[in-house]
Image (tube, rainbow, N blue to C red):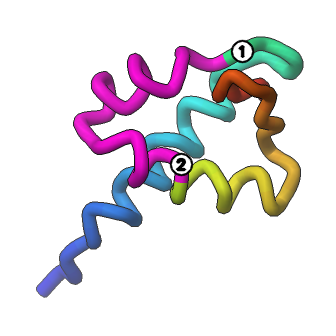
Amino acid sequence: MGEKIHPYQLLQIKLAELIRNTPAGERLLSEPRLAKELGVSRATLREAMRTFEAVSYTHLTLPTIYSV
């Protein structure tokens, strides 16, 4: 049987795909819009985005705008 994917892992997969499909230097949607589009809370989105920031896939500028 296949293993279930935890919702947080699914979010990371979706974000990874979004980041891969966004040209370098381009901004992602605002945090509220991105969270709504992905169906998660802003806090959950922030937590997941920290993973990508830690490995330098994204860059956060205030007010909470993520760039690739």
Given residues 62 and 41, the one toward you in this image is 62
Q: Is residue 63 above or below residue 46?
A: above
Query: For residue 32: magenta?
Result: yes
Query: Residue visible at 52% across and 41% down?
Result: 15
Residue at mark 1: 27
Q: Secondary structure at mark 1?
A: loop
Residue at mark 2: 46
Percent across and percent down for residue 48 are 53, 56
Q: Quadrant of the N terminus?
A: bottom left
Q: Quadrant of the C terminus?
A: top right
Percent across and percent down for residue 47 are 53, 58
Horizontal side of residue 2 vs 62, given as left or right: left
Contact, CB < 8 Å: mark 2 with mark 1?
Answer: no
Percent across and percent down for residue 50 are 66, 56
* Kind of residue indicated by mark 2: Arg
Query: Residue visible at 40% across and 40% down?
Result: 42
| The quarter of the displayed image where residue 2 is located | bottom left
Main secondary structure type of the part rendered in magenta: helix
Query: Residue visible at 29% across and 26% down?
Result: 36
* Kind of residue indicated by mark 1: Arg
Which residue of the protein is positioned furthest toward the bottom in this rendering? Answer: 1
Specify few, some or many for label 1: CA neighbours under 10 Å numbering under 14, 14-19, or 20 or more: some
Specify few, some or many for label 2: CA neighbours under 10 Å numbering under 14, 14-19, or 20 or more: few
Highlighted range, magenta: 28-46
Going from N to C along the chain, the mark reached first, 2 or 1, is 1
